[in-house]
Amino acid sequence: MSRPKADPNLPPLTPGGLGIYRRLLAYALPHWPMFALGVLGMILFAAVDTGLAWLVKEFLDGAFVERDPQVLVLVPAGIVGLFLARGIGDYLSTFAPGWVGRQVIKSLRRELFSHYLRLPAAFFDRNGVGPLLSKLTYNIELVAEAATTAITSMIRDTLTILGLFGWLFYVNARLTLFALAVAPLIVGLIRVTSRLLRRYSTRIQDSMGDVTRVAKEALEGQRMIKVFNAERQEAELFEGVNERNRASYMKLITVRAVSNPVVQMIAALGLAAVMYVAIRDVLDRGITIGEFTSFLTALLLVTAPLRRLVSLVGPLQQGIAAGASVFEVLDSPPEGEGGPRRLARARGEPEFREVTFGYGGEQGEVLRGVSFGARPGQTVAIVGRSGSGKSTLAGLLPRFYDPQRGQVLLDGVDLREFRLADLRAQISLVSQEVVLLDDTIGNNIAFSAPGAGREAIEAAARAAHVLEFARELPQGLDTRIGERGALLSGGQRQRVAIARALLKDAPRWPRRGSAPARP
């Protein structure tokens, strides 16, 4: 699957949350019709609260002041109609953004996974598998939450607040302006809370990466742990990263827990002051009982969406922090396509000329001035102590790395001149750490040649002595081997890897079902 092309109109990753959030929203924009349906539901939902405040005024003034008998019919019908509209609005504003959110998660995960596959080997040397898996699972869920669910609630509650304040101004502008005096305090609190929540969200995501990493290492290395009686050591290590994750979460929860009551207290003080002034107006015959009750109802109704808006700061900041970490990976330059030179079929004559290479850091230079070559058909063994650079030499040939000095050549041509895909098409690799898929033996062999026929797969399996043990299994080559080939022995896994490498050699091991040609 090819990686989706980046939109050139997208804003670049910036330190500020606004740029990141705009970039998040870009993933939701292709689904704008469904999102627009959700917005319609939000408008309908928000209008109901304003309608309730209006209905209170009409009922009290009509029933107790004007003595209008029609109120007995119109008000109950209005209540039923308003709550029917509220139900429809609630459904649309919940379902539509939820649908968009899952689409965003799917698209973003596809793009991130595709980008993982295109990143150079050096990137994975610098970044552990645990944090990368955490970005693909946990972080993207937070991103979608911020880009869809949170924005939905924000729009719905903002519309509700605007509608209610519009009604408040209509009923009594002086009292409404008096109530808005507490707004600067609430805005200032939200700004402080936002900074704290983003900081703690970043720490949580980092700690989740550590939890994933330690757990993955322990589960994959459980046999080694048992042999060395290291269960307690691993448990203590996991407890350490787990505790750091808990502590970061508690800081986040504390900020959330403190911010909501403070906002409510500020709102309560403003409400108390407004009620004092309003009651004086009633006593002075400045407003009717219906207007007063309607004003008070609208003022009470506005507190709930205001509280929800404050609580949204957390998910939004978590999503922004998660988006920053995901976009950091997406903005990492992928592996290039190599040089312009095409290579259909190599003779198979590699050569290293004065090659010097180092991974950086404290390791220094792993290879220094290495020179050797091999002729087609020749077997070359490279012998040396552990850490002397044998695996590094193998990594230079398919250009997982490029030498700092010197040249690596194939058939007399510098590897950097070849198209990368053409170069790697000439190479089969059987590493010391065999990587197998949780699939059948046959499909693992065919991984190197997806179009291979059954006869070619069996021929490669026979050449690598895989059939010797596969025939003893219930399904033969169609037997699933478990994660990382756990159901096979180490030697059997190596044979499967050798068969996979042999099958890739197209001239000798044909891909379309014919038997292999003998040299």
Image (cartoon, rainbow, N blue to C red):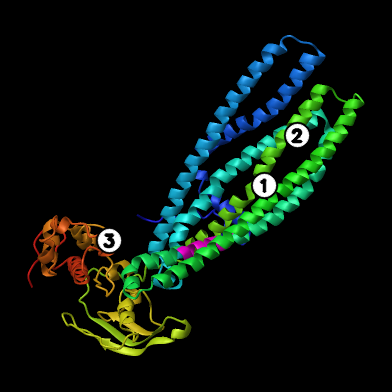
Say what amino acid the circle numbered 1 marks.
Val
- How crowded pointer 2 is (Cα within 10 Å; few <14, some 14-19, many 20+) is rated as many
Q: Circle 2 sits on which residue?
A: 299
Estimate the x, y position of residue 315 in percent, counting from the top left.
59, 50
Residue 52 image point, x, y percent: 69, 26
Query: Which residue is label 1 attached to?
Result: 310
Q: Secondary structure at mark 2?
A: helix
Q: Earlier along the polypeptide chain: callout 3 or callout 1?
A: 1
Horizontal side of 317 relative to 109 (left or right) equals right
Q: SS of the residue at dot 1?
A: helix
Q: Residue 279 lies in what quarter of the image?
A: top right
Q: How many neighbours does mark 1 have within 10 angstroms: few (below 14), some (14-19), or many (20 or more)?
A: many
Name the spot of residue 136 as percent of width and height, x first: 44, 57
Answer yes or no: is residue 408 visible. yes
Count of number-bearing discs: 3
Is residue 474 depicted above or below 207 in this figure?
above
Q: Name above or below for residue 111 compared with residue 358.
A: above
What amino acid type should be assigned to the residue bearing mark 3?
A: Leu
Residue 128 within the magenta-colored segment of the rendering: no
Sequence order check, earlier mark of 2 and 3:
2
Quarter of the image where the C terminus is located: bottom left
Of the two numbered discs 1 and 2 on the same chain, state the one appearing first in sequence.
2
The residue closer to the viewer here, 485 or 95, is: 485
- Which region shows up in magenta? 201-211
Q: Disc 1 versus disc 2: distance between alpha carbons?
A: 17 Å
Residue drawn at x 47%, y 59% as measured from the top left: 135
Point out the frontmost of discs 2 and 3: 2
Is 72 on the left or on the right of 122, as rendered?
Answer: right
